[in-house]
Image: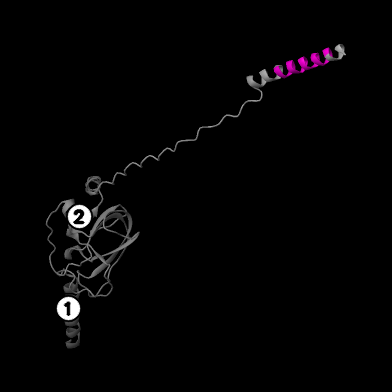
Amino acid sequence: MRRAGILLLLSALLGALVVLGASPAQACSCVGGTTAEFTERADVVFTGRLISRTEPGGLVRSSADPARHVFAVDAVAKGSASERQEVLSPVSGASCGLELAGDGPVVVFATHTADPHISATWPPLEDDQYFAYLCGGSAPLIPQLEAELGDLRPPDPVAAPMPAAPVEPRAAATTAPDRDGPAATLLVPGAGAVLLAGGALLLRRRRAR
C-alpha cells in the first residue's frame, strides 16, 4: 500500500509538471491596430501560404517555446523575403504565437527582433531570423486587407521619356544623268546630222575635181 501511494504521488507530480509546462507563460492580450500601423512596426511584410509548421519536441514544454513556420512567399509589400521564408513564433496563441493554418493565402508582419518578454528563454538564433506574433497583424489575406496593402505600396516611378535622337542632315544626293533620258535623245539626231553634212561636203569636193 505504501509503495502504491508513492507511485500515485509521483504520477500526480508529473502530471502537474506537464500542465504547468504547457500552460501559457503569460496571457496574450492584443491591442487593435490598422494595417498601416502593423506595416510601420514590421521589418518585412509579405503574402504567401504556410507550407510547414514545426513545433518544439519534448514532453514538458512552455507555450512560449518557438515554433518554426515556413511560408511560400507570393509577394513582398515591405522589406525583403526569400521564396521560402522561415518565421519563428511562440508555439501557442496563449503566448501570442501565430494562429495560422490551412492552405489559404495569409499576410505576415514580421520583425528582425524577438519580443524579449515572450522570447527571453529562447536559445541564441541567427541574426537574419524573422519573428511574428499573434498581435502583430498577421492574418488570413482577405480582399479588404489585400486592398489596404496595395494602397500602402509606393507607386512605381514614372519613367521619364527618352530624348529624341538628333536627326543628322543627309547629304544632297547627286543624280547621274540619265543616258536614256531627253538629253541622250537630242544628242543622237545631232550626231546623225553632222555625219550627213560631212558626207555631202566630200561628194561636192570630188565632183569639183
Q: Is residue 195 magenta?
A: yes
Q: Nearer the viewer, residue 71 or 39?
A: 39
Q: Name the side, left or right, on which 5 lies relative to 186.
A: left
Q: Which mark is residue 12?
A: 1
Locate the C terminus by quadrant: top right
Vertical comparison of 156 with 186: above or below: below
Q: Nearer the viewer, residue 198 or 206?
A: 206
Q: Residue at x 22, y 48 (%)?
A: 152
Residue 103 occupies quadrant: bottom left
In the picture, the disc for residue 124 is none
The range drawn in magenta is 190-204
Query: Regarding mark 2 in the picture, which secondary structure is present there?
Result: helix
Rendering coords of residue 147 (x, y %) = 24, 45
Q: Residue at x 19, y 69 (%)?
A: 64
Q: Is residue 44 above or below residue 190?
A: below
Residue 149, given in percent of the width and then of the height, sits at 23, 49
